[in-house]
Structure formats: C-alpha cells, structure tokens
Image (cartoon, rainbow, N blue to C red):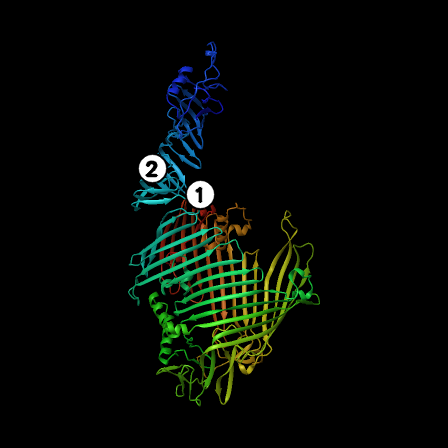
Amino acid sequence: MLQLKKSKNIVFLRKPRVAMLLTLGIHKSIGFCFLFFFTFAAYGQVKEQEEFRGIGAKVPSYQRNIKKDSIVSVIPDSLRSPENDIETTVVYDAQDSTIMDVGKQEVYLYGEAEVTYGDIVLKADYIKLNWDKAEVFAHGLPDSTEQGAGKVRGKPIFTQGAETYNTDTIRYNFKSKKAIIKGIVTQQGEGIIQGEKVKKDPIDNLYLSDAKYSTCNLAEPHFHIAAKKIKLVNKKSIVSGPFNLVLADIPLPIGLPFGFFPVPKKKEIGTSGFIMGNYGEEPNNRGFYLRDFGYYHAFNEYIGAKVLAQVYSRGSWGVGLQSNYTKRYKVNGNVNIQYNYNKPGDDFSTTGATNDFNVSWSHSPQSRRSDRSFSMSVNVASNGFNQNNRRLDEVDNYTSNTSGSSVQFTRNFGKLLRTSWGLRADQNFSTKVFNSSMSYNIALNQFNPFVPEKLQTGKWYESFRTGLNVSGGYRVNNSKTTRSTTYTDYNIAGISNTPITNEEEREITEIQNLLQQRNLSDAERAALQDRLAELTSPVLTDFREILDNGIFNNSFSVPIALPNFKIAKYINVTPSISYRGDVYTKSLSYEFLNPTSGQLVASNGTIVRLDQTADEITSSYVDGNLVVNLNPNSGGVVVVDTTNGVAFGQSLSYGTSMNTRFYGTYNFKKNGRLKAIRHTVAPSISLSYTPDNSGSGGYAVRTVISETDSIKTERYLPRFIGSSGGVSAASGNLSFGITNQLEAKIRSKSDTAETEFEKISLLDNFSIQSGYNLFANKDLGEFALSNVSLSTNTSLFKNLISINANASLDPYAYEEDEVITSNLAGKRIQTYKWNYKDGDGGNYLNNANLSISTRLSPKTLRKEKPMPVENDPVKEAMEKFIAANPLAYVDFSIPWSFNIGYNINYSKQGLADPRITQTLNFSGDLSLTEKWKVSLNSGWDFEYKAVTLTNISLLRELHCWDMSFNWTPIAGNAQRSSNYSFDLRVRSSLLSDLRVSRRRQYYDRGGF
C-alpha cells in the first residue's frame, strides 16, 4: 500500500482504515473521493507539522467554521489492489520548495530534491511525482551561478540497490518498473556504460542506443567501444551489435559484428575485453609484427582465458590460448597452448619453415589439510620452439634448452611417516636426450626408540635418534654412453657407445671453430649446433632399445643421530652414523685391453680389438665390432661392459662434528660516536670415515686404467650407472673452517632516536673452508688436501651497496704433459706447490669472483619507512611480487632510480693461460614529468670491448592507459641488431592503485 510522505516538513498521504485511501494500485475514483474532502487548489510549501491525511486530518484555519459531521461511517474497502501492486512508502523531500497539484495528482520538488521508494533513491534538482500514474520524472536545472553559466546542475542520479545511474533525464514508473532515460552513465563491474537513449524493462535489462563502453572513468573517456545498440542483461553481461574501437575520439578500423562482455562483481578479479597487443620489427628475421592482440574473457571469479594472435610481415604467424583458474582452498592452475608457423625471413637460412608448438599445464589442488598435497606440471614443446619464438617475457627459455613435466603426490601419516610418489619426464632439445622416471619415497622421521617423547625428561641419552628412508623407482632414457672428446689419462670404450671416428673428430673441430664466428645468422648457428649434438650425443631411436636402457633402483638409508654433548661447556659435539644400501638391475664391469691381450668378447657378443698402428687417441667403429685406437698415454684402453642382473651396493659411514663461537670486543673512548667493535669467530671441524666400499658389495670397482713400462696404474671406477653412492676406497675426510663477523656499536646521530646506540655490520661474513683425506692413496691418483675456498660478503652504508667475493686456492702443482700436447693445463701431480722446484707449478689462485651492486633512489637515500597498507590480500601479493622484481615494473611515484652492478671473474687451470671476464651492467629511469618517464638498460663487456644489449624506453602514463616506446639500438654479441616496438595498453586497475606500470622488456618485443 502506498504512503506518500514528505520528510522533515511532513506532507504525506496515508491510507487509513476507511474508504479515504490513496494507493498507486487503486482505481481513479479514489481521486474523486479525495477531491470531495479537499478543495481543488495549488498548494505551496506547508507549515511545520501540517498534515494531509484524508479523514482525521488537521483542518486549515479557513475551514474551521464548517460544522463537522457527527456521524462517521466506516465503509468496507471493496477495492483491493492486485497482488503485484507496490505497497510501500514514497518519501520525498526538497531543499528549495515543494508544490502539490491535487487536481493533477502531482507533487513538484525543486532544489536538491530526493524521492525514496523501497531500495530506489532518486536525486535531482527537479522531480515531478505523479501518484495517480505511479510515475516520477526528473531532470536538472540551469546553473544560475556565474561559474556555472550555460551548464546544468543537479542532474538525476538514480540508485537501485548497489547500482547507480547518472542521467540527463529519467522517467520511471514504480508500478511497471519501466524507465525511459536520456544521457545515462553507469558503472558495471570495472566498465562504464554511456548511452544517449535508454529503455529499462521490469527485469532490469537496459537497452541503450548510441552507446559507449569503456574502463576509463572520465566523462569523455580516452578510449571506448562504440555501438549503435547495446543491451545490459540483468546486470550480468553486456551484449552489443556491430561495434568499433574509438581512441581519443578517433574511430579506428578495429571492430567486430557483435560483442559479449561479462560484468563481474567489483570484488572479482578480471574484466573481459579486447587486448590491444603491440607492434614492432624484427629486422633480420620475421620482419614487422603485430602480436599479443586478442580477447580476454572472464567467465567468472574462478576462471578466465585469453586468446592471443601474432602476425609478421614475412609470412610467420601464431595463435595461443592462455587460461588461469583458481578457487580458494580448492584448486589453482593454468593452461597455455601455443602454435607458431615460422617462416625464415633471411635468404641465408639453412632451414625451411617450421611448425612449432608448446603445451603447458600446471595444476595444484589446494587443501586445508597439511598431511597431503598434489601437484602436476606438464610442459611439452617441439624441438625448435624456444629458439624460434624468443619473446613474451621468456628470455630464460631461449637460453634454456630443456622442457619437463612432473606429477607429485605426498601423504603424511601422523608425525612419524612421510611418503611421496612422483612421475617426471624431460627432454633436452640440443642433445635430443629424453629422460623419464617413476619414483617413490617413504621416510620414517627420526625418533628415540628407547624413551617415548611424552616421557622424556631432558637427559643426555634422550637425544638419541634414528630413522629410515626408503626410495627408488624406474628411469629410462634414449641416450647412449656419452661420447667425450675431452682429455683424460686413459680411454674408456663403452660397448653400448658409438665411438667417435677420426672423420667425426675433424668435423667436430670444424664446427666448433665455425660457432666462434660472430657473423652467423640464427638459422646457421642452430643448424651447426644440431649437427654437433648428433656427433657428440647420439641417441637411441628404437623403442625396444630405449626400454632396454631402463634401470630399476631401490635404496634405503638409516640415519642415526647420537646424543649431543659439550666439551668444556662451550664446544658442541655432534656424532652420527649412517648406513645406506642400493639395489640395481644393471651393473658395470671393466677390463683393460693392451696390445698383448689381442681381443675380448663382451657380454653381448661384441668383439673388441685394439688397433696398435693408430697414433691418435680417438676410436673407430668397424664392421659392427668395436675397434679402439691405442692411447699412447695409457698403453691400452679400458673397456666397460654393461651386465643385466640384480646387484647390491652398501656403505657405512661414521662422523662427528664440533663447533663453537667466541667473541672479542674492543671499546673506544666515550667522547666519540664509535662505542665498540665486536669480532665474532665461529670455528668448526668435522671428521667422517667411510670403509673401503669397492668389490662385489660396494659402489666402486678397482680397475687397471694404464700400463706403461710394465707399471700398472689403477683407479676406482663406478659400479653402477647414475649411482648416488661414493666411488672411492676407504676415506677419512677431515673438514675444517672458520667464519668471522665484524659489528660496530655507534651512538645515534639524533637525540630523538629510540635507542642511544645502534649496531651496524662491518663484515657480514668471511669464511675459510678446506678439507683433508686421511686415507688418500697416491697410487690411485687421490689427492689428500682439498682446495681452499674463501668467501665474504658485506653491505655498506646501511645496505646501500652489496659486495660479494669468493676465491679458490689449489695447493697442488702442475707439470707439462709431454704426451698430450693439447692439454694446455698440464697434469696435476702429487706435489704441493710450495715444495715444487722444477718450475712455477701453476698459480695458487685458480678461481676468483667479485661482484658489487647498488640500487639508488630518493627513497633509499632518505631511508623512508614504508607506509602502512590496507588489508587487501590481492594487493599485498602484487606488492610483494613488485618488491621481488623491481626491474620488471615502472614506479611513477619515484622521481628517479639507478641500478649498477660490476662483476669480475678470474679463472686459471694449472699451466693454462688465465681467463678474465668483466661485465658492467646498469639500468635506471628518470621521470621527466609526473606522466613521462624514460628508462635505460645497458652495460659494457670488457672482453669484447663493446656495449652489451641496450634498451631505451619512453613511457607515458595516460590515466587509464600506458604508452611505451622501446628501442634496442644494440643487441649484443651474436644477436639481432636494432629493433623497436610501440605499445599502448589499458592499465590494470590494481596497478593504478599501486601507481606502477608493467615494464615491457626488449625480449617482450622480439629483441633477440
């Protein structure tokens, strides 16, 4: 039932329990009853508390002399409203004036007028309410102020629930819920719809003509989709007829015959729309391009997908599908499918057109249960995909030549038992080697078998722990025994190997020399690398042979942690015992073949003979049997044979470690800022012993590897392929090291500081590490003393500059190799350099590295504390990612930033010439204005004395857009020369809040 009520100055009509009632759904005759009791007149602003209620109303002064009727009849209401009539109160108010025309049954509201009806609120400077038609009409009024001359103020704002519509005029019927609107502006999700003429039906559908749809929130958007007709379907989706894209009021020839745009809720992430893409040029390859353009569709808050395309002026093209799905506490994952047709753009290409594809799928169910987890990752690609499609934030994929897939499941049973199962497959595109494996792991967490945890009282023997790890699986690959051309003291000829012939050796050398040339095209370089892989890493192609190459392996280990104890209160001692065993289905055996041996027959029937006339180290393959050349350095060759059958290996090791920490402090005078310096020293020493594990039950086989002048030389060679056990005789390794730290205590500069003194780090870490094998056997070529490693790192000026350095010292001498003259490093001998008298013996320093880096900006120089942020999980996650990848984003709130890093590396192996590499990398950006920013990324290669890959970017923030121009004038060694790209894309609303933009690097544009 309708109540017409005036707020504040209360003027309303209410339906009483008599025949005098006023309802929107009532017959017009009620209006005549109303006129029977009230004079027909225009009524102005009423006095405070005056009411018009029908029967029982307060009588005006000019009617007080009229005699009242003493007989009051209560007549039953025979006029019932239909079930769908609106029965609620209409509350209205106006700041300026309220005029009621009883004859027309209308109320006129002027000046900041407002009408409320249920969840509907209408505000405007002029509103006309007709209670007979149950209709309201509103529009704005001319602005009479000097500043607003010629403008309209107080345009209607229609709100229903959470939806708001800004209009020029609106006519709305409360009863039919229909509306006719002119000049509407409303936000739906992250998009804004504008229309010249609009009709609204009872189920909240909007029909707009001459409409615009945009995510720009300006009255005149920077860009929009223009369509003659658009329909907003129940606030859930937008459907349009033919439309085109308009940029800066310039219609572009980009459009479709129809459009469908879902309207997600404001809290949902993702808005459907077109992706503009970018364009640029690959001068020496595929030519001009337009790529990464397409359409993104947000199906709902859980799943979204985008279809992207790319076209090139020289005939290449590609299409891809990328989809992400997530549901909190349930699952998340992504699917990427890409197909590319690549047509070489240069006339010197040695390969034709290629069809490349890549399919990747990552799936991970989410569970609140911590006792189980599951994950799956699939990545399948054609051999040339990474090399032929080097772009899209995947510069690492270009240098990476592998692709892999995996499935992993873990399940824990209580606090004691952990299990996991997995499948994995990977492929190396360079070597064409494919690996596949199935694995399992069962682990029993360490526990005390004598005293239950609940009954432990802290006694020393209660720290005794033991556990059990069982793992294994099946692995198979298509690789043959690796073909090696590197220098060794002896030759090893594998029965399953296809040895390198003299012809192939010469071809390998020729290819390696060609690859050093810098003027090779990408296609030429790729073809040479493929041929080199065929020569050095042959693979199996027969499926049965690949299965025969598989190996079953099962292993177990029993770690035993003995009780810890202290010596002299300050030295911590930790003893341990470990036992492990392995079961394999294949094992290796070795036999030394010399000129007097003649020949031998392998387990597979292959006859191996030695060619005594050859004077080269390489081998040759003749008539299906193996003929190996005599190695003049060893007097023969070691023949390895693979035997099928179950074989067992085991090892037992004992160990103990000791460590402590002590401090030294030097105090300074009281009148200075420097209060004290503290030196922390943490020495450590550990000893481990492993008995001889050679023989039938071990992991190594003692084998003769050379025989010259009747002197036999032996080595320990692995008994299993891919064994994780040690390959040596008995060993007693003594490892020792010392770590140092320097800290200073200084007086705070400010009297208002929280503490009087503060601690700063002068040297974060300086460590020296080495080791000594107490059971090293010189006759077996084992070296007792390990290389001495040094490392240090620190930061200066409150973490403004980071410094890292490390070095390695080799204590043993080298001497020239008189037999193998190509071995420039020489032979490492069992003599310390300080005892070597026959020459320089090589340098002590065989490797050193130093890196210095810093990142400067006004914030880092001022040491500003970060401002607290609102509790928004999505925004917090984005901020963490930006903080971890600062170079991937442009922050317009930072006036400038500069990053520089210097790295120098020194390496020298034995008597070989040292190799020094130096690189200087720097990047930075400068805000020319609040909206313009220029950035630079470059470096200097000291070895080539040339500028490294250089990229210059010009960025412009355009409110709801980001514009960037990227130019790569120098593409570095063996890469494509100058290229450029121009990018114009809609800003993410989240990035708008964070005031940053996604930086598009050179490799996003085809910068290789």
Pick the quarter of the image with the C terminus: bottom left
Q: Quadrant of the N terminus?
A: top left
Query: What is the crowding at mark 2: few (fewer than 14 residues within 10 Å), some, or many (at least 20)?
Result: many
**In this picture, is 788 found above or below 291?**
below
Element type where label 1 sits in the image: loop
Q: Answer with left or right where residue 75 lies relative to residue 746.
A: left
Relative to 335, say whether 585 is above or below: below
Find residue 1005 and report its horizontal and vertical position in percent.
Answer: 37, 56
Q: Amino acid at mark 2?
A: Leu
Q: Which residue is mark 2?
A: 208
Residue 362 lies, in percent from the top left, at: 43, 58
Residue 342 placement, left or right of 827: left
The number of discs equals 2
* Residue occupying image coordinates x 42% and y 68%: 435
Tell me whether the residue at label 1 lies in contact with that at label 2, contact meaning CB atoms closer than 8 angstroms. no
- State the SS at label 2: strand
Residue type, label 1: Lys
Q: Is residue 538 visible?
A: no
Which of these two is toward me, 428 or 65?
A: 65
Q: Position of residue 76 (x, y in %)?
A: 43, 20
Position in image of residue 265 (x %, y %) = 43, 43
Residue under label 1, please give it: 266
Give me the C-alpha separation between circle 1 and circle 2. Answer: 22 Å
* Residue 166 lies in quadrant: top left
Up/down of 790 relative to 18, above or below: below
- Of labels 1 and 2, earlier in sequence is 2
310 or 866, which lies in front? 310
* Circle 1 crowding by C-alpha within 10 Å: few under 14, some 14–19, many from 20: few
- Please say whether residue 144 is visible from this viewpoint: yes
Q: Which mark is residue 387?
A: none
